[in-house]
Amino acid sequence: MTDQHTRFVQGSLIRGIIFHIGLGLSVGLWGIPSLLSFPLPYRTRFWIISRWSLWAIWWLRITNGVRWEVEGLENIPAEAGIVMSKHQSTWETLALQSWFKPQTWVLKRELMWLPVFGWSLTLLRPIAINRGAGRSAIRQVIRQGRARLASGSWVVVFPEGTRIAAGDKGRYRVGGAVLACATGAKVVPVAHNAGEFWPKYGWRKRAGCIRVRIGQPIDTQGLRPEQLITQVETWIEGQMPTLSQHSNPR
């Protein structure tokens, strides 16, 4: 390992640490106005709380040089539906709030137990499920998801269930597709390569440009959940090689 490479690695690690320190401090600071927003209407609460998410990806760009570009914004329909996104990083859980708003998420209930962060998350009416609950969890997703859609909120689903390392592929679960077919809501697929720049583990971030691609809405009428999730998986995974090849690390 050359001295130049050693300095690069050390500098990257330091920038990553600075980012995470700022991120941690900001949770506490932003948590105060977020928690105080509880009596306000949902859309107002979403606007206040989501400012932190937008600040976080800005802070990532400032400290670590991680930029992004988006294709397909014209594909987002006016009526709220279901977003099914590739899940490689924490980045997309924050950035999707820029384009699909207001929104809520299907997520594991353990996130709700985190001090300040989880309490603020509760105010955004997530569909918090017990992954081990089987059919009971699916019924919860349908019941609460139907209510969220009826109120005009996008429902964001990560069908792989957990963050998957860049270059790998997880098993696409059918829960979000069951909700879409039960409600007739359109599904907007999203592919990206955020995991190449903000990986699942470690402090280091990789400077460069995250590429996000938003697909055309999928009409769920007449589809079975298995057919729908196959379409979503085929589209997302079909985009990944081109997104990775055209990423712009530096």
Image (tube, rainbow, N blue to C red):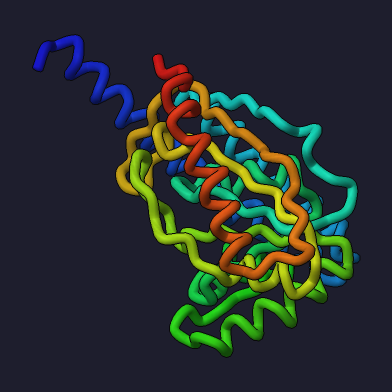
Report which quarter residue 104 is drawn in: bottom right
Q: Residue at x 62, y 25 (%)?
A: 69
Q: In the visual, does 218 lie left or right of 11?
A: right
Height in image: 177 above or below 48? below
Question: Residue 201 location, x and y as percent?
Answer: 32, 47
Residue 183 can be seen in this image: yes
The C terminus is located in which quarter? top left
Q: In the visual, does 124 lie left or right of 211?
A: right
Question: Residue 46 location, x and y as percent?
Answer: 79, 57
Question: Residue 236 location, x and y as percent?
Answer: 54, 44
Q: Nearer the viewer, residue 81 or 12?
A: 81
Q: Nearer the viewer, residue 4 or 28?
A: 4
Q: Residue at x 50, y 85 (%)?
A: 134
Q: Nearer the viewer, residue 90 or 219?
A: 219
The N terminus is located in which quarter? top left
Height in image: 15 above or below 159? above
